[in-house]
Image (tube, rainbow, N blue to C red):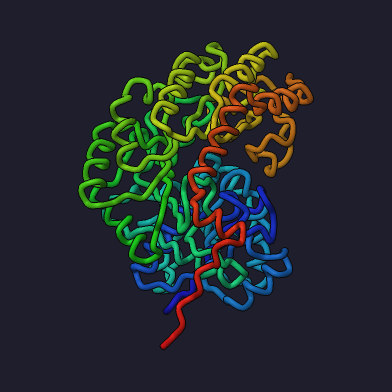
Amino acid sequence: MSLKVTFIYPGIAGRGWNSLKQGMDAGWISHGLASLSAAAKAEGFEVNLIDLRALSGWDHFREVLAERDPDVVGVTMMSVDYNPARQAIAIAKEVKPNVVTVIGGPHVTIALQDSLRIPHVDYLITGEGEITFPRLLHALARGERPPYRVLRGEPPDLDAIPFSDRDLFLEEWKKWGYDLDSPEVPFVEELPPPFATIIAGRGCIYNCSFCKPGEDYLFGKRVRRRSVDNVLAELRMLVDRYHLASFMFHDDCLTEDREWVIEFTEKYIAEGFNLPFFCQTRADIVVRHEDMVERMVRAGLRGYFIGFESGSDRVLKFIRKGTTVAQNLEAARICKKYGIAIWANYMMGLPTETKEEVMATVRMMKEIDPDYYSPAFFTPHPGTDLYDFVVEHDLSRITDYDSYRRNPTEPKIRGQDYEFLKWAMAESQRRKPINAFRRWARRQWKRLRRVTPAKVLRRLGLLRPRSAPTAA
């Protein structure tokens, strides 16, 4: 029996329907689905994708699904995707009652009992699915239905699995108007298209209470990282296939493994790579390993994502971040020393956080003066210790799964003044006059450096533009 598999990406909680090309929320692939697709295709199965972000609504989804006529529907689900995932599965069973429905992803793993309550789901896969999902497909192809609904994933050898199937997304997007010459949508000026995200490893060794132990449930308590050679082989493939010009490591914290980073930078340079890239790091790592930072800059690093989180040492200790305000400020200083763009992640409205501590975060952000601000109202996510704290103390104001968005748009917990927080968040992004002037001066200098005598003469009409060459 030959099976047709349709994956569904339900990520419309952020920007909604018809949102392709609208930044990272609606222009990046799901590495989970892309990896599962590569694994399934390697086993000979036919796989396609329906990305809700590309469609106009549920009626449109129903039409497309009927056209695809799949035998198996696979849906990935984070907590924020619960509602659209549930609706997509219900429609799939309406369109084709005998279709086999499978769900997986973070919410299934960290909130299994909650996921089991979703109607019309035949199988749930917890953990990583590159081994378990193709095994399920083979069983279904033989006409065998596993007797258990919950199938536990097995951690794969990350060097042994195929590279993420980016064409799964790119080919589907092009059907609905995606016209960029880039596998994923660029999001900062330092990373020109064609741009892509890659993942070098899974897991995180740190213990932040707003993240753990949920991530341990997904990947285990240790980090499993691909070999440097395997990552470089993927980069070569991306350059050959998509003419890649820049990329971003999507790892939780690439720099936690100093030895891996040193080996990567040495081989990256030795093999002639010069693509600019971003990655995620921590303030304490930047401070302790400035020599590693300098190596990464020489290799092509253009920016760091850093979770500064709070300007209060008490709050940082409360959330088990493992960093200090002093380290936050020193990390920013080091980044500026080496010309590294700073993408600043930080939160407001944490449990027990006072207005004075919020203002400390405002002052810290003005001092850091990041290139990119990424603020959030604290959101208690299932599977984390801070979520349990919020539930235990009856602090949650979340009444719908859609509210698990990290964007600072709505109240999340009791005991916080959200009008004040909205003001503080806006104030945190208002630069000091001296910093605003410095940034303006740098922009003007960059513009002047791009000016040439020929450009000036052409602008004045004193030099005719070059004519295009004519065919012989």
Q: Quadrant of residue 407?
A: top right
Is residue 292 shown left or right of residue 196?
left
For the point 37% across and 66% down, the residue is 241
Pinpoint residue 52: horizontal percent, then vertical percent. Answer: 63, 61
Count of numbered circles in the view:
0
Q: Is residue 384 left or right of residue 130?
A: right
Give the x, y percent position of residue 468. 49, 75
Looking at this rendering, what residue extends furthest in the bottom direction?
Answer: 472
Query: In which quarter of the view is residue 204 placed?
Result: top left
The residue at the point 42 percent across, 79 percent down is: 1
Q: Is residue 284 left or right of residue 352?
A: left
Which residue is more in the foreground, 76 or 11? 11
Q: Nearer the viewer, residue 55 or 1?
A: 55
Residue 364 pos. (x, y %)? 57, 18
Residue at the location (52% across, 73% down)?
71
Instruction: Give the residue at x 56% y 28%.
Output: 438
Vertical comparison of 50 with 439: above or below: below
For the C terminus, give its image quadrant.
bottom left
Query: Does residue 360 lie above or below 220 as drawn?
Result: above
Instruction: Name the residue nearer the viewer: 126 or 206.
Output: 206
Vertical placement of residue 278 versus 142, above or below: above
Residue 457 is situated, as x and y percent measured from the top left of the image, at 55, 57
Q: Is residue 189 visible?
A: yes
Q: Residue furthest front?
A: 462
Q: As rendered, which of 126 and 463 lies closer to the eye?
A: 463
Residue 383 appears in the picture as rendered: no
